[in-house]
Image (cartoon, rainbow, N blue to C red):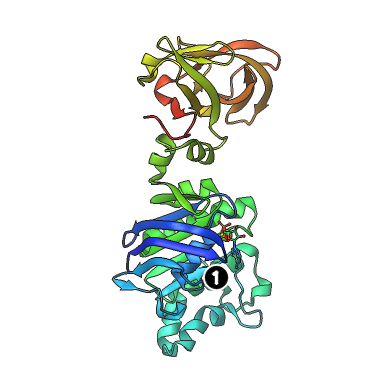
Amino acid sequence: MAGVSLRALDKSYGALRIVKGIDLEIADGEFVVFVGPSGCGKSTTLRMVAGLEAINGGEVRIGDRVVNRLAPRERDIAMVFQDYALYPHKTVRENMGFSLKVRGISAGEAAVRVDEAANMLGISHLLDRRPGQLSGGQRQRVAMGRAIVRRPQVFLFDEPLSNLDAKLRGQVRTEIKKLHQAIGTTIIYVTHDQVEAMTLADRIVILRGGEIEQVGTPDEVYNRPASVFVGGFVGSPAMNFAKARADGGHLVFANGDRLPLSAIQVPAVDGREFVVGIRPEHFTANASEVALSCHVQVVEPLGSDTLVHFAVGNETLTARMPPETRVKAGETLKIGVDPAKIHLFDAATERAVH
Ligand code: ADP
Ligand code: MG
């Protein structure tokens, strides 16, 4: 096993700079998830670690080796893609064992490793089937098994769950986490799905336009987002944003509502403009002194919670309320906010203020 470090990692296609000087230290055994919108450079970064993409600047180290110039097979990594690309005419056993055979590992040793991996993934009963006789989730497990038998220093996953339906995605996600807990090998995992990132990662790396926007534990990126971008990206339903201005010790919203700044504990100069971030789950039905006047537009009962969409001035916000909430579209009411959970971002830079 080994850690991975990326130092000033850079990639351009022609004149277009795609990855812009990424610095990141990944500890041995850590599960790191790269997350960000489509096109932000996640796959390109992962492929540079894998050796599938040339590096234009900076360095990739795996363990204590600089691997920039090593071919993929010399890097001791194993990659699992969205598209599993199993050999259709080989059995599961042969698919899983093939790379070991190519690497000259004895048939006896290969059989032991295949059995062990199949057991770990719960696919021992499928070893004699061909990929065409498997469900999507089973094929995905075979693709993981093929990586596991290699016993690499580092696993690289690129959107491995994207081809599965929602229910199966949840199941296989849990299995990937169990797998990491069992074998403890360093994992770098790419996804555009923030739920996958939050549930799997020891640390999340949020990428935006080829740069790191924030690195942190799931708790840190959820509770202390460094920017409007991160606040809006992590959490579902997404964080609400509304503009407000500091005035006389209050935050004043466009509709004239005022929240006392002392409750939010941010010193602010009168006239300073903020983007205020409030998560749907941090509104409360009982309006304390920290409350917004809102006009209820749509109510969506989900069973476990009820989403209430409401207007504050001309911005639409969403609150996640307990299921017993009796609120109707068209009503006007005061909705409370937990002041400790309010996020303030500078309106110009969109960076967090505290
Ligand atoms: P992500 O995985 O985050 O969705 P990628 O790393 O695949 O994004 O791509 C990042 C950007 O690089 C995208 O704008 C994509 O169009 C561009 N890109 C990727 N591969 C190539 C290539 N071979 N040639 C030119 N541009 C590319
Ligand atoms: Mg990608």
Q: Which of the 4 image quarters holds residue 249?
A: top left
Label 1 sits on residue:
143
Provide residue 189's location: percent of width, then percent of height: 47, 59
Residue positioned most to the front: 15
- Can you see residue 52? yes
Pick the residue in front: 119 or 80. 80
Label 1 crowd bin: few (<14), some (14–19), many (20+), radius 10 Å: many
Residue 13 lies left or right of residue 2; in this view the side is right
> Disc 1 on helix, strand or loop?
helix
Provide residue 89's location: percent of width, then percent of height: 66, 83
Q: Is residue 261 above or below residue 184?
A: above
Provide residue 82's location: percent of width, then percent of height: 59, 64
* Residue displayed at 46% across by 13% down: 259
- Can you see residue 120? no
* Residue displayed at 55% across by 72% down: 125
Residue 281 lies left or right of residue 26; in this view the side is right
Q: Which quadrant of the rendered structure holds the C terminus?
A: top left
Residue positioned most to the left: 64
* Residue displayed at 63% across by 20% down: 310
Q: How many marks?
A: 1
Provide residue 200's location: percent of width, then percent of height: 45, 52
Q: Is residue 304 above or below residue 30?
A: above
Pick the residue in front: 163 or 95. 163
Query: The disc labelled 1 sits on which kind of residue?
Result: Ala
Q: Is residue 242 above or below residue 106?
A: above
Q: Which of the 4 image quarters holds residue 120?
A: bottom left
Q: Which quadrant of the rendered structure holds the N terminus?
A: bottom left
* Residue displayed at 44% across by 27% down: 344
Q: Quadrant of ligand 2?
A: bottom right
Q: Is ligand 2 less than 8 Å from the beta carbon at label 1?
A: no
Pick the residue in front: 225 or 56. 56
